[in-house]
């Protein structure tokens, strides 16, 4: 792998909707490679297909990258010397190169209408515009020069297509897949410039990569069949010596390994596939993202990096800086990586456990605000220490700690009612009096009082600990019950025991 010139890579999404985790992984691998080699990571917006453009999608892409911590060095928002960074703003440059290809005999005008091509597809189910039929279709190769000139002069709608060689092969060294070879006769004459004057991906990606001095291209495996067209364009435009090195990343697969992971799979199996929430501006439907599901960005990035890459050891836990340090293309797998949501949750749980509480407190505070609760930092810190080891997502804090902010709406009284006795009622009535008279309210004192009273009653500790817990928190869960009691405070504990007795005896 040659690194003779400065490393410049690009992430080039289309602003058409939510950002799939496969797209974020492509951005991440680009970023890691660039930063490992002290290079530049560029964001280019490929918005040439105006029929698929979605308002708000570009801002969404920027926010996704910012959340992941992989901010571009150059972008529409942070332009450098090789802009513009939106393809729609580069429109005049593309026709120049398309016309150059026609002059050199490597492309041609195609005047076929959409209706004519649809008719061909009806006649030939596997129709493709290629060397096999181009001379029987309406283009500058099959028509005489006078007719072509007349059609152009009249402004007849037309596309410009690459003229693929009838024989021969195109080969290149892929950084992941090594040598890849294609037979040109099997590839159709792709449209380079559309009738509206906008380029297709095939022309735009080559022209823009040249203009932006891109040194290495990391993109999904699904673009591999397009590689020979792009390589020929680099050659036909006279830029072969400046062509970037290629790396086609493995697919992220469905959990069962059968096919590429899609949004539909996430909907069906109940997990996110987008980095962040995406709301369709037309339908208003919202697709939940990893961020809103409760993933930490560090965990999301760590998980993504391990989908198709490893550092050669058994280690799986990496910070972004560690990933930059260790990243190497030769550790990227050729095979697809199965997405495992349970493993994704494991990464998030590990990151929550390892993240200092002071970094989690603002996230917990924001969660509480959503619940209409304002809580002091000190209280959140105290509660986080109690429930953190039970949390997989930030939202789990509420599940495990909500009873500290409000009395439980219902109690799991069925867990204690069958074995309830008058002696137990008497015990709790007496413990209320004992607690009310207690001045020093600490877990150790509460425990001593409670167990001393049990000893005096002749009952067993195990018979009374569960009812106390259920009265305080509503169910059979939570940390040490006496720590819970200390944290709730004397008044709340007394009130909840009174309420619990009333419900259990009903």
Image (cartoon, rainbow, N blue to C red):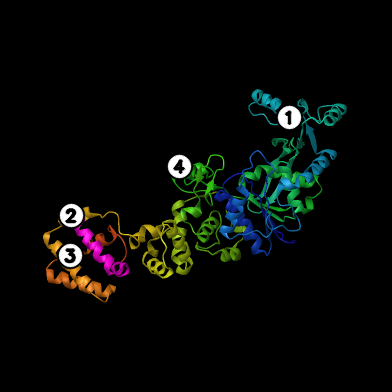
Q: CA distance from mark 1 to mark 4?
A: 43 Å
Q: CA distance from mark 2 to mark 3?
A: 14 Å
Mark 1 or 4: in front is 4
Highlighted magenta segment, given as a residue range = 480-506
User: Which residue is denoted by mark 4 in the rendering?
Assistant: 268
The answer to whether mark 2 and mark 1 are in CB contact below 8 A is no
Task: Give yes or no for residue 170 being in the magenta stretch.
Answer: no
Is residue 392 visible to us here? yes
Q: CA distance from mark 4 to mark 3?
A: 49 Å
Q: CA distance from mark 1 to mark 3?
A: 91 Å
Considering every residue shown, the one lying at the far bottom of the view is 440
User: Which residue is denoted by mark 2 in the rendering?
Assistant: 417
Q: Earlier in the sequence, mark 4 or mark 3?
A: 4
Q: Earlier in the sequence, mark 2 or mark 3?
A: 2
Residue 181 higher or lower than 481, as above or below? above
Relative to the observer, which residue lies in front, 495 or 367? Answer: 495
Q: Secondary structure at mark 2?
A: helix
Q: Give the class, few, some or many, for how many residues have Cα within 10 Å of label 1's Cα (few <14, many ≥20).
A: few
Residue 132's disc number: 1
Q: Give the class, few, some or many, for how many residues have Cα within 10 Å of label 2's Cα (few <14, many ≥20).
A: some
User: Which residue is denoted by mark 3 in the rendering?
Assistant: 428
Q: Main secondary structure of the magenta part?
A: helix
Q: Earlier in the sequence, mark 1 or mark 3?
A: 1
Q: Is residue 435 left or right of residue 184?
A: left
Mark 2 or 4: in front is 2
The answer to whether mark 2 and mark 4 are in CB contact below 8 A is no
């Amino acid at each position: 792998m040659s690194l003779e010139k400065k490393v410049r890579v690009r992430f080039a999404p289309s602003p058409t909707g939510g950002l799939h985790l496969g797209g974020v992984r492509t951005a991440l691998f680009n970023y890691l490679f660039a930063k490992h080699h002290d290079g530049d990571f560029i964001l280019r917006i490929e918005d040439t297909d105006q029929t698929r453009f979605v308002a708000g999608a570009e801002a969404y892409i920027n926010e996704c990258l910012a959340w992941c911590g992989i901010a571009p060095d150059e972008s529409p928002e942070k332009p450098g010397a090789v802009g513009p960074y939106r393809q729609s703003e580069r429109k005049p440059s593309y026709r120049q190169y398309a016309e150059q290809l026609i002059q050199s005999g490597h492309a041609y005008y195609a005047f076929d209408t959409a209706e004519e091509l649809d008719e061909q597809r009806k006649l030939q189910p596997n129709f493709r515009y290629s060397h096999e039929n181009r001379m029987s279709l309406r283009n500058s190769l099959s028509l005489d020069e006078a007719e072509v000139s007349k059609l152009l002069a009249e402004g007849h709608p037309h596309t410009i297509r690459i003229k693929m060689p009838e024989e021969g092969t195109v080969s290149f060294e892929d950084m992941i897949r090594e040598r890849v070879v294609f037979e040109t006769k099997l590839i159709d004459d792709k449209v380079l410039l559309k009738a509206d004057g906008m380029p297709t991906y095939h022309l735009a990606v080559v022209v823009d990569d040249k203009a932006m001095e891109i040194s290495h291209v990391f993109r999904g495996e699904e673009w591999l069949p397009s590689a020979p067209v792009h390589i020929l364009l680099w050659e036909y435009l006279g830029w072969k010596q400046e062509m970037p090195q290629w790396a086609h990343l493995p697919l992220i697969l469905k959990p069962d390994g059968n096919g590429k992971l899609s949004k539909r799979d996430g909907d069906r199996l109940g997990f996110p596939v987008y980095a962040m929430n995406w709301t369709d501006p037309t339908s208003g439907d919202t697709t939940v993202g990893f961020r809103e599901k409760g993933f930490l960005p560090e965990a999301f990035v760590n998980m993504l990096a391990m989908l198709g890459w490893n550092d050669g050891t058994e280690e799986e836990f990496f910070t972004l800086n560690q990933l930059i340090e260790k990243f190497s293309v030769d550790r990227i797998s050729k095979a697809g990586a199965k997405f495992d949501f349970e493993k994704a949750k494991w990464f998030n749980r590990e990151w929550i456990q390892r993240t200092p509480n002071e970094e989690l407190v603002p996230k917990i505070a924001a969660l509480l605000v959503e619940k209409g609760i304002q809580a002091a930092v000190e209280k959140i810190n105290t509660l986080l220490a109690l429930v953190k080891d039970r949390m997989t997502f930030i939202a789990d804090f509420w599940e495990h700690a909500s009873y500290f902010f409000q009395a439980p709406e219902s109690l799991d009284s069925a867990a204690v009612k069958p074995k309830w006795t008058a002696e137990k009622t008497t015990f709790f009535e007496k413990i209320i009096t004992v607690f009310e008279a207690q001045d020093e309210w600490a877990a150790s004192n509460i425990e001593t009082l409670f167990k001393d009273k049990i000893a005096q009653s002749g009952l067993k500790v195990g018979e009374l600990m569960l009812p106390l817990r259920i009265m305080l928190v509503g169910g059979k869960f939570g940390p040490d019950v006496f720590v819970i009691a200390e944290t709730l405070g004397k008044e709340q504990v007394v009130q909840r025991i009174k309420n619990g007795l009333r419900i259990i005896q009903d």
